Amino acid sequence: MHRIGFLINPIAGMGGRVGLKGTDGMLKEAIERGAKPVAPVRAREFLQHFTTNHTEHIDALLILTAGDPMGASICSQFEVAYKTSYVPVSAHTTKNDTMNAVRMFLEENCELIVFCGGDGTARDILEVVKDRVPILGIPAGVKMYSSVFATTPESAAHVLSDFINGNVRIGNGDILDVDEEAYRQGIWNVKLYGICKTLVEPEFVQSGKTMIEVDESEILDGIAEHVIEKMDEMADALFILGPGTTVAHVASKLGIEKTLLGIDCVHAKKLIARDVAEQELLGLLGRYQRAVLVLSPIGGQGFVIGRGNQQISPEVLKRIGLENIMVIATPAKLSTIPALRFDIPEREIMDKLKVVKYFPVITGYHTSMIKMVQV
């Protein structure tokens, strides 16, 4: 029987939809802004997919988990064998609970640790695990730049099944994280914290973020000119500008100081809302008959939605419409990603993306490329 450690960071990702760009040290404010738990929902999706689609492995698995709110009650909702190996001292868990739970999993000879959280959770686990067993992340944080995360909870279930079958390679993964306080100020400073063992399956496990350093100023100017021309053509539309330097270049050509790592809104080429959260977006979408969402994929990973822009919730996407998403990227960035990826906690939208299969990407003035969609 395979022994798998399974834990949830219950506060991971709560800052995303309310525009806090992370939850580290910001839980109280996130709750005051109306944030709801994300990680337990994603953990439940993972176990739902595993127990529904990989039934042949259920009897071969013993899950070592932690007491509530770190996993036990969610395990109890499914027909899986599980054991509570660690009980947190309080419902308000800390990194110490994560680390103590992992120590207990290792003492009980687990073969793999599956966790539901973000880059911060991965750092805490690495501190204990070192290179003793591989780790696999169910994506639930805000940023998730480390190369240990499955692309979606469904993908995590698939990778676990392959691990039990012996059909997945164990390799090295980078644990990356950013200074969240600097991140909230628009300063992107990522740091490599260490190397761990992880499961290598490129279709289902993301790579680390890649930075593009070549001079592409003329190409970026062309992309910006294309987007601004669309703003002229659709003068009544709300343009929602996502995070990142590619989109920020569009804003700079409009004379707008963009929130580099946040979401800003433009109408008639004028800034009308800055660094908005989900509820602000929904309010604005109620005032305009149509909207265009301008996004750029993460270099190396390919994520368009689901990493660092959780303000773009399923409800926001339903209001905008998939047909009104404008993806922009330089050819050099596109060369670092095999496909455009989406991680949206709404089955209906993910199913539509599976039907779409391909998405146009604006790569210059009146220039585009077709890129495969992977969900």
Image (spheres, rainbow, N blue to C red):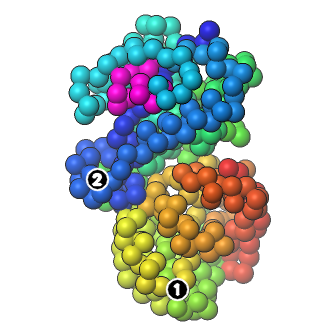
Q: Position of residue 213 (x, y in %)?
A: 57, 57
Q: Under tag 2, what secondary structure?
A: helix
Position of residue 237 in the picture relative to residue 188 (left or right): right
Determine the residue positioned at 74% across, 76% down.
367
Q: Quadrant of the N terminus?
A: top right
Q: Is residue 171 magenta?
A: no
Say which of 14 and 99 sits in front: 14
Say which of 231 and 314 sits in front: 314
Q: Label 1: few (<14), some or many (≥20) within 10 Å?
A: few
Q: Position of residue 48 (x, y in %)?
A: 58, 35
Compared to 275, does 205 lie above or below? above
- Dot 1 amino acid type: Gln
Q: Are marks 1 and 2 in contact (CB under 8 Å)?
A: no
Compared to 212, does 256 lie above or below? below
Residue under label 1, please give it. 289
Q: Position of residue 172 (x, y in %)?
A: 59, 26
- Dot 2 amino acid type: Ala
Q: Under tag 1, what secondary structure?
A: loop
Q: Which mark is residue 30?
A: 2
Residue 190 can be seen, yes or no: no
Q: Earlier in the sequence, mark 1 or mark 2?
A: 2
Query: What's the distance in space between the residues labelled 1 and 2, CA to CA?
Result: 30 Å
Determine the residue positioned at 36% across, 37% down.
10
Determine the residue positioned at 63% across, 69% down.
322
Q: Position of residue 227 (x, y in %)?
A: 60, 81
Q: Which mark is residue 237?
A: none
Q: Magenta span covers which residues?
A: 64-75
Q: Label 2: few (<14), some or many (≥20) within 10 Å?
A: many
Say which of 89 and 58 sits in front: 58
Compared to 152, does 279 lie above or below? below
- Between label 1 and label 2, give the one nearer the viewer: 1
